[in-house]
Image (cartoon, grey):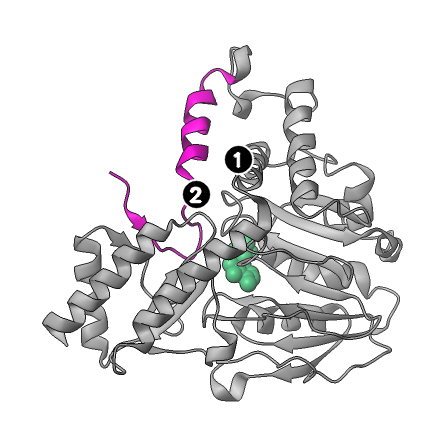
Amino acid sequence: MRVHNFGAGPSTLPLAVLEQVRDELIDYHGSGMSILETSHRGPRYDRVHRRAIENLRELLGGADNHTVLFMAGGARTQFSAAPMNLLADGGRAAYVTTGRWSEMALEAAARYGDATEVWTSRESGYDRVPAPGELEIDPGAAYLHYTSNNTIRGTQFHHVPAVGDTPLVCDMSSDILSRPVALAPFGVIYAGAQKNLGPAGVTIVLVRKDLLERSPEDLPETLSYAAMAAKNSLLNTPPVFAIYVVGLVLRYLHESGGLAAAERRNRRKAELLYRAIDESDDFYRGHARPADRSWMNVAFRLPTEDLERRFLVDAEAVGMVGLKGHRSVGGIRASLYNALERSSVEALTGFMDEFQKTRG
Ligand SMILES: *Cc1c(COP(=O)(O)O)cnc(C)c1O
């Protein structure tokens, strides 16, 4: 029996993909071995690698001006890799701080170059993101970095910041491919796979091709966008299993109607849960300012921490797991990534209603 998995990452995967992985595991396409045991330099893995990239490009409508990289070290490594590649010639980077992950990205960048915080919602407990037009543009900046979805506090950009010709560098770890995205303003997009795309172990990085020139010669090769691009991410042994599963998830997403359909499903799931919160007479209280509510991570509180503990225990008893808020903030957090079914959200809202009636 599978549970309703609201975990923030690693998180639920499409059942159809897990079943395919299981079916192909021992004997991959008649090779007599699993993909885990296959050379990353051979034709079998080569097909897996190329198809994963093709599927990603297809979902993104081509992405012809960007190179697709598979890198290791998680999104956390990109906090450093982005400034190491893009700020080596000097120049300054602008950072929008909307939560703990973007704080960490800024701290990392400040170790490698001139990185300045240009906007933050720290004072209000990261309950919001800048409104369209609110960011001041620094036309001389090498790039502007932001986190499209704050996984911990549950806020999300529902627009792409307009900053003129300054390339955007975006940490999309927790909402990549949850909705369509126009790539033109983005210099770099990076995302750890383990939230919306697959298992942990691989980071998807899209780099606008003209920016590859900025990678300095003296970077460790596996951190250099230019060196990784030159070898199509096969500079060293890539995380083959993670890339294989990501490829299956991408194909599944494509076959389920692509990003426009994913957006519709995700929006409906989020609306269902926020409605339950808003109609609870303040028993459940959402953290984010309504305009900036995340469709991926819904963070809310109950009247007391005692009730929150009770809520988590009772939820688990009926097969709903992963609802504990991030350890730094507490409360409840339900993550509604692409692969989470609407029926799981319906089960949760039903449970919330029942919990309030019996314990409220
Ligand atoms: C989870 C997360 C990270 C950290 O990802 P790792 O792959 O564990 O390094 C970074 N940024 C955001 C927005 C996240 O949600």
Residue at the spot x=69%, y=25% of the render?
Answer: 46
Pointers 2 and 1 in contact (C-beta within 8 Å): yes
In the drawing, does residue 211 fall left or right of residue 106? right
Q: Is residue 312 visible?
A: no
x, y (%) of residue 82?
73, 60
| Magenta residues (range) | 1-28
Residue 10 among those drawn in magenta: yes
Residue hosting label 2 = 13
Q: Is residue 180 above or below residue 118?
A: above
Q: How far apart, in angstroms, are the residues tagged by discs 2 and 1? A: 10 Å
Bin the neighbour count of mark 1 within 10 Å (Cα to Cα): few under 14, some 14-19, many 20 and up: many
In the drawing, does residue 38 fall left or right of residue 212? left
x, y (%) of residue 233?
72, 39
The image quarter containing residue 179 is: bottom right
Bin the neighbour count of mark 2 within 10 Å (Cα to Cα): few under 14, some 14-19, many 20 and up: many
Residue hosting label 1 = 245
Q: Secondary structure at mark 2?
A: loop
x, y (%) of residue 328?
40, 72
Residue at the spot x=64%, y=24% of the render?
Answer: 45
Residue 85 among those drawn in magenta: no
The image quarter containing residue 117 is: bottom right
**Quadrant placement of the C terminus:** bottom left
Frontmost residue, 61 versus 74? 61
Q: Secondary structure at mark 1?
A: helix
View quadrant of ligand 1: bottom right
x, y (%) of residue 296?
47, 61
Q: In the image, what residue type sits under mark 1?
A: Val
